[in-house]
Structure formats: structure tokens, C-alpha cells
Amino acid sequence: MAQQPNPFRLDNQIALITGGGSGLGLAIARCMTAAGARVVITGRREDVLRSAVAAIGGDAQYLVHDVTQFDRAAELMIRVKQQLGQFPSILVNNAGNHLKKPALQTTDDELAAVIDTHVRGSFALTRAAATHMIEQSRGGSVLFIASMASLFGIPQVVAYSAAKSAYLGLVRSLAVELSGRGVRVNAIAPGWIDSPMLRKAFAGDPDRERRILQRTPMAKLGEPTDIGNAAVYLCSEAAKFVTGAVLTVDGGISIGF
């Protein structure tokens, strides 16, 4: 009996991951590489990208790109093809910035900066990538990295919450428009994931960590690979009938009380 191909593999896929030099983007890049994808990570700091590619191993490559340069999104797709021989068949919109500030003290410019990075930047890249996915008749997968701030109110992050909530609107509308043309669109909403950034946030504030763990039914923090493995699933043939979905990877915190 012939062995069936593993539907969770990403062989022959080109994955473009924004903000792939650190944090969740780096974890996603590692997991996708392990699943057989050829990965290209982007970011603004070449030294960070170079170190990340060395850590990822395999055939991982990088391209310096600022997602807020909206008019260069189409150019980035051409650069990927020049470097790897194909346009991306997977796009992971992960790049982002953060602002912790009371809502009434958040300026118009600060709000716009967060919206530009998350919403306008990811939309420009999605439009450029999906155009090639459709034209090549290969189909593809677009993944947005959302947040718990997409799902419920968190104080002092109004700009971030607005941007990450907008992601879910993009996912729904894009999925309806593009899925019939072979491009699936989904999101992951990570919970609290153990990382140097989170540990820095917890430093000197043990009550915050205690409150988060008390609200999490699994009573622990997630790991970056939890997000990476979820990304592999959503972009693989195993999820070929999944589109417009928001997968919470949060230890149950979004349904906890």
C-alpha cells in the first residue's frame, strides 16, 4: 500500500514571514523550515535577520524590508522570486509594534503609527502576495498573527487593540473574497507566550504573572513553538478546508473566568 503524503508538511512552499527575526516570527520560521518550507524572513534590522537565519538553519534567507513602505510591497514579492525562484505561496503577517499608554494620552500620530504597521502594512503585502498566488494558479495561504487584544479589552493598549481587532475584519473579508480563488486566509490569536519580552514585562511585577496564570485554565504560559506549530497547520494541506478562522492558542484564557 502506497504511503500517503503527510498533510502537515510544507514541502515546495515558499513562506514569507514579516518580523521574522525574533519572537513569534522567529518561532514560526523555525517550525515552517522544519516542516519543509523554504523560508524568507523580513525586518528592518539586517544584523538581527542575519543572526536569525543562522539560528533557523536549513535554506532560510532574509530580505530587509519595512512594512510601512506600502508602495514597496509589490517589489518585495519580486525580490523573493529573484532570490528563491518563486513568488511566496505563504505569507505570514507578523510584523508589529506596540504602544502601552492610557487611551486619553494616546496621540493621533501614535495611533496612526500602530495602525500603519499592522493594518496598512499587512494589507499592502497581502494584496501583493495574493495577486501572484492567484495569477500562478497555485493558490496559497495568508496568515495574520492577531492577539488576545483582538478578542477582549486590555487597558492601556488602545492603539494595539484597534490594530489587532482590525486584523479580524481583514481575515473575514479577505477570506470571503479570495478563498474561492485558491487563497485561504486565517489568523492565530496567541495568548501569553513565554519569551524574553514577556519575562521583562513580568520583572518586578509577580502579581501580574500570578493573575495571568490564575485566568488561564491550563495554568501555564505557552511556548513560541505552540504558535509556530499552529502556523504550520493552518498553512498546510491539513487545513485545506479552513479559511476565515481565528485559532486561539492561549491555554484557554479567552474562555476562562
Image (cartoon, helix red, strand yellow):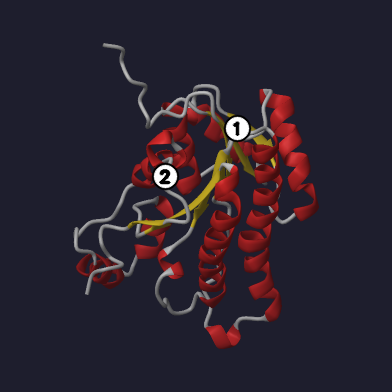
Q: Mark 2 is on which residue type? A: Phe
Work out whether 84 lies above or below 127: above
State the quadrant of the N terminus: top left
Q: Is residue 174 left or right of residue 156?
A: right
Work out whether 156 lies above or below 217: below
The residue nearer to you, when weighing 27 against 132, is 132
Dot 2 or dot 1: first in sequence order is 1
Query: Pointer 2: what residue?
Result: 241
> Quick check: can you spot residue 99?
yes
Query: Pointer 1: what residue?
Result: 138
Q: Is residue 109 left or right of residue 179?
A: right
Instruction: Name the quadrant containing residue 6.
Output: top left
Q: Is residue 225 left or right of residue 180?
A: left
Q: Mark 1 is on which residue type? A: Arg
Secondary structure of residue under mark 2 = loop
Q: Residue 18, position in %: x, y? A: 59, 46
Q: Is residue 31 left or right of residue 42?
A: left
Q: Residues within 10 Å of mark 2 (few under 14, many from 20)?
A: few
